[in-house]
Image (cartoon, rainbow, N blue to C red):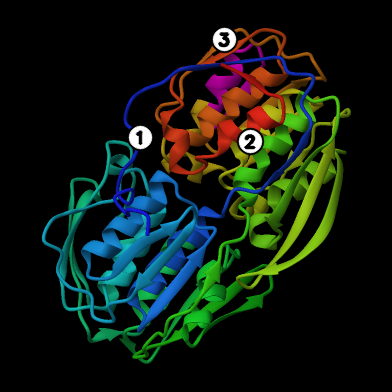
């Protein structure tokens, strides 16, 4: 058995990297394991009766922080080999002996607050400086309606001290802003509530909790309702152990595929990518931009349809990206803005207010990334307009301030692979929070990153 000390450890040292024009990019890699499903699998297994085996788990800093917290709440979480974990659940979570430090993981902290809400315990949730600047009230407000007590720092931020209850009330709730994390927190709490809890979404978000929880015996489902959906869970139910193989992450796969579109001279294929419509918005936009892209079905995993995606370099055109697609690609706007810089014409993205409350003000930071490298942009309160410079037309030569945001760091490096001059990214340490294999995958494809 491999030591499980890895859980809870995350990168802290700042490390700069440079990306240079890489026309030789091409090849094939497997999609990085999905971060969203990895978090959920660890949490559900940690509440279940019996021993669950999770394979292809994303061993990123974020997921390891969640694993460490689940262990602190009473479950046994052990690494058996690379990507292979064994979780022996604790159906009655206990008050942890110390604060639960979730590092940079917004997904981990919000889902764990919901999961912990159904137990008679008190837990203090903390995080790093970036996570501590992000809003928590959107997840806590519905949990309070269910019977949870929670105290926050000023502005509804971390640290949060949460006192749960084994007698929660079921609720019907419509989140004011589309958020899969808030929805999942409610559903996980609803597992312990009296009656049926429902979450009504005017605009559908990813439904990984609703897909994964039934594998552990939960009476939970989701139904489409026009442009939205209704998720429901029956409370007062026990979970049983399950074996789960984690499929490939469409958000992480966007980076090697983007490199193939803006920098390469051959094909780039990423295998085993989730094609769930609630996660596939970027790929629909790429189709509209005229990307030379082939999507080949590749079976199913953990209830999700998969595909292998191949891209070839070519001329892209600017498009208008409507606000209603934002929930299905909220994490992909930084890399889309980079792709748009290499397109011909103007790309307008709207409905992006949520980006201002991510690991950084991701909207302003994406604009700054492009401006620093010679790309004209217009930044609005909830919009970004990128004036494309065509294939090979981006000057580059600038420095990217990542603000400790992993997706900005990767997006800056992708820009450098296609730009005329070297692009410097000031800190890449946080890439390990979501895509620890990024540099290995990019090197295998021929990227010049030093």
Rendered location of residue 47, percent (x, y): 33, 76
Q: Residue at x 46, y 71 (%)?
A: 53
Q: Which mark is residue 11?
A: 1
* Residue hosting label 3: 398
Upstream in sequence: badge 2 or badge 1: 1
Q: Secondary structure at mark 1?
A: loop
Upstream in sequence: badge 2 or badge 3: 3
Q: Quadrant of the C terminus?
A: top right
Marks 1 and 3 sit apart, C-alpha to C-alpha, by 25 Å
Q: Secondary structure at mark 2?
A: helix
Q: Residue furthest front?
A: 1
Residue 179 in view in this figure: no
Q: Residue at x 35, y 59 (%)?
A: 110
Tag 3: Cα neighbours inside 10 Å, few (<14), some, or many (≥20)?
some
Rendered location of residue 137, percent (x, y): 30, 57
What's drawn in magenta, residue-wise?
Answer: 366-380
Q: Nearer the viewer, residue 130 or 156?
A: 130
Q: Which mark is residue 441?
A: 2
Q: Quadrant of the N terminus?
A: bottom left
Q: Nearer the viewer, residue 173 or 231?
A: 231
Rendered location of residue 82, percent (x, y): 48, 52
């Amino acid at each position: 058995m491999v030591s499980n000390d890895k859980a809870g450890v995350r990168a802290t040292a700042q490390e700069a990297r440079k990306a240079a024009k890489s026309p030789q990019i091409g090849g094939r890699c497997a999609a990085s394991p999905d971060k969203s499903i990895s978090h959920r699998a660890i949490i559900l297994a940690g509440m279940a009766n019996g021993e669950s085996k999770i394979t292809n788990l994303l061993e990123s800093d974020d997921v390891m922080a969640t694993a460490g917290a689940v262990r602190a709440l009473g479950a046994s979480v052990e690494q058996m080999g690379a990507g292979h974990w064994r979780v022996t659940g604790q159906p009655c979570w206990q008050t942890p002996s110390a604060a639960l430090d979730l590092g940079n993981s917004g997904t981990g902290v919000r889902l764990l607050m919901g999961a912990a809400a159904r137990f008679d315990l008190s837990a203090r949730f903390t995080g790093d400086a970036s996570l501590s600047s992000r809003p928590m009230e959107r997840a806590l407000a519905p949990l309070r309606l269910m019977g949870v007590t929670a105290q926050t720092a000023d502005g509804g931020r971390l640290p949060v001290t949460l006192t749960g209850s084994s007698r929660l009330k079921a609720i019907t709730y419509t989140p004011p802003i589309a958020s899969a994390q808030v929805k999942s927190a409610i559903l996980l709490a609803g597992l312990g509530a009296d009656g049926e809890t429902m979450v009504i979404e005017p605009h559908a978000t990813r439904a990984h909790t609703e897909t994964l929880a039934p594998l552990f015996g939960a009476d939970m489902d989701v139904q489409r309702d026009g442009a939205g959906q209704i998720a429901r869970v029956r409370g007062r139910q026990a979970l049983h152990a399950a074996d789960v193989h984690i499929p490939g992450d469409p958000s992480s796969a966007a980076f090697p595929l983007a490199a193939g579109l803006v920098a390469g001279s051959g094909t780039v294929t990423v295998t085993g990518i989730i094609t769930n419509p609630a996660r596939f918005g970027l790929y629909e936009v790429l189709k509209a931009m005229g990307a030379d892209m082939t999507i080949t079905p590749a079976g199913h995993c953990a209830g999700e349809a998969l595909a292998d995606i191949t891209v070839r370099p070519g001329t892209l055109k600017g498009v208008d990206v409507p606000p209603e697609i934002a929930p299905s690609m909220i994490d992909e706007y930084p890399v889309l803005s980079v792709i748009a810089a290499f397109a011909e014409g103007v790309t307008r993205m709207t409905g992006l207010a949520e980006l201002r409350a991510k690991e950084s003000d991701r909207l302003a930071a994406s604009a700054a990334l492009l401006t620093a490298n010679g790309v004209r942009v217009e930044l609005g309160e909830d919009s970004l307009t990128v004036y494309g410079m065509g294939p090979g037309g981006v000057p580059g030569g600038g420095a990217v301030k990542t603000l400790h945001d992993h997706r900005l760091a990767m997006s800056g490096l992708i820009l450098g692979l296609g730009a005329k001059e070297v692009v410097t990214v000031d800190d890449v340490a946080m890439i390990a929070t979501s895509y620890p294999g990024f540099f290995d995958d990019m090197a295998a494809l021929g990227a010049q990153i030093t």
